[in-house]
Image: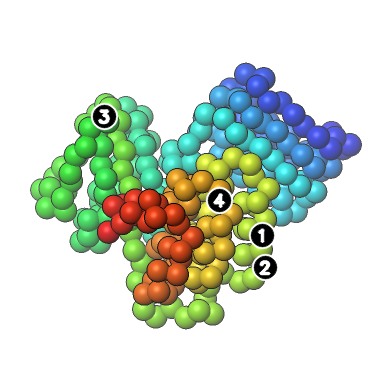
């Protein structure tokens, strides 16, 4: 459609099977300015739509989109798992071969780094503890059940200069994308993708944190950004953006 400016398909019972077709329709509607997809059961396939919406923000006329209550969790977009930047919160269905493979990749990455990067583990809702020694001895996840964990994988920025941080144009674009997205899980997903490609300085990280309104979202955002922040020695500056309870939660998550 070459004239459509507003698209509201909220609560239309759209399912996963429609996602690729909808992404193509968005691509073929260059005049779209506002898109609302709230309340649909798009699940993990929402990644295709989210990517298209981001492209439209860059090259098209799209001004705002909303994907609230679409029954997808950015932490479960397993195709975005990157061993070079695996930091994030994961909730994995071990009966799904792709998601079980992500769990195995997390284990392999922990062994490769020689560090305990998997933290706050829960197996079927119960707390468990996976030490590096256990992983080296051959621990593997069960074939069924749910595995939930935080992955905190720090990168070595000893030789990284501030000139290598995200340039101002890309920073403004990322900030704009976060601002126009109403759904905070989609915002976290975009932030994680950006941190796979760019480093951040402390001021950039702090300003991005203030784009999130809820404490839980700021915690998730900081966990996503932490491996990409260049000068972590002064991380206390970024923590100023968190409430006292969130600071305690971050200490629990990342130490």
| Helix, strand or loop at mark 1 | helix
Task: Quadrant for the N terminus, please.
Answer: top right
Residue ID at (31%, 38%): 148
| Helix, strand or loop at mark 4 | loop
Q: Earlier in the sequence, mark 1 or mark 4?
A: 1
Q: How many labels were placed on the picture? A: 4
32 to 158, vertically: above or below: above
Residue ID at (74%, 40%): 27
| Helix, strand or loop at mark 2 | helix
Q: Are marks 1 and 2 in contact (CB under 8 Å)?
A: yes
| Distance from the alpha carbon under mark 3 to that under mark 1 | 39 Å
Q: Are marks 3 and 1 in contact (CB under 8 Å)?
A: no
Q: Earlier in the sequence, mark 4 or mark 2?
A: 2
Label 4 vs label 3, nearer the camera: 4
Q: Earlier in the sequence, mark 3 or mark 1?
A: 3
Residue ID at (55%, 67%): 204
| Distance from the alpha carbon under mark 1 to that under mark 4 | 16 Å
Label 1 vs label 4, nearer the camera: 4
The residue identified by callout 1 is 173
The residue identified by callout 2 is 169
Q: Earlier in the sequence, mark 3 or mark 2?
A: 3
Q: Position of residue 230 (x, y in %)?
A: 44, 72
| Distance from the alpha carbon under mark 1 to that under mark 2 | 6 Å
Q: Are marks 4 and 2 in contact (CB under 8 Å)?
A: no
Q: Position of residue 130 (x, y in %)?
A: 18, 46
Residue 124 is labelled as 3
The residue identified by callout 4 is 212
| Distance from the alpha carbon under mark 3 to that under mark 2 | 43 Å
Label 3: few (<14), some (14–19) or many (≥20) C-alpha neighbours in 10 Å = some
Q: Position of residue 48 (x, y in %)?
A: 59, 38
């Amino acid at each position: 459609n070459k004239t459509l400016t507003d698209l509201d398909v909220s609560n239309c019972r759209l399912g996963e099977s429609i996602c690729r077709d909808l992404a193509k329709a968005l691509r073929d509607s260059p005049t779209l300015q506002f898109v609302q997809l709230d309340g649909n059961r798009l699940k993990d396939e929402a990644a295709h739509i989210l990517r298209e919406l981001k492209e439209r923000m860059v090259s098209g006329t799209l001004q705002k989109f909303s994907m609230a209550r679409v029954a997808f969790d950015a932490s479960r977009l397993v195709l975005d798992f990157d061993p070079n930047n695996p930091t994030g919160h994961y909730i994995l269905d071990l009966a799904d071969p792709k998601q079980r493979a992500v769990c195995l990749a997390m284990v392999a990455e922990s062994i490769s780094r020689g560090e305990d990067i998997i933290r706050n583990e829960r197996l079927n809702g119960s707390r468990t503890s996976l030490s590096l020694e256990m992983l080296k001895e051959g621990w593997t996840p069960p074939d069924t059940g749910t595995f939930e964990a935080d992955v905190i994988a720090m990168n070595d920025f000893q030789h990284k200069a501030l000139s290598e941080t995200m340039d101002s144009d890309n920073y403004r674009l990322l900030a704009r994308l976060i601002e126009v997205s109403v759904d905070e899980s989609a915002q976290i997903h975009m932030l994680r993708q950006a941190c796979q490609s760019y480093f951040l300085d402390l001021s950039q990280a702090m300003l991005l944190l203030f784009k999130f309104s809820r404490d839980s979202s700021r915690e998730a955002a900081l966990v996503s950004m932490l491996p990409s922040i260049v000068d972590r020695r002064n991380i206390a500056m970024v923590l100023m953006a968190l409430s006292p309870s969130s600071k305690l939660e971050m200490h629990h998550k990342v130490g």
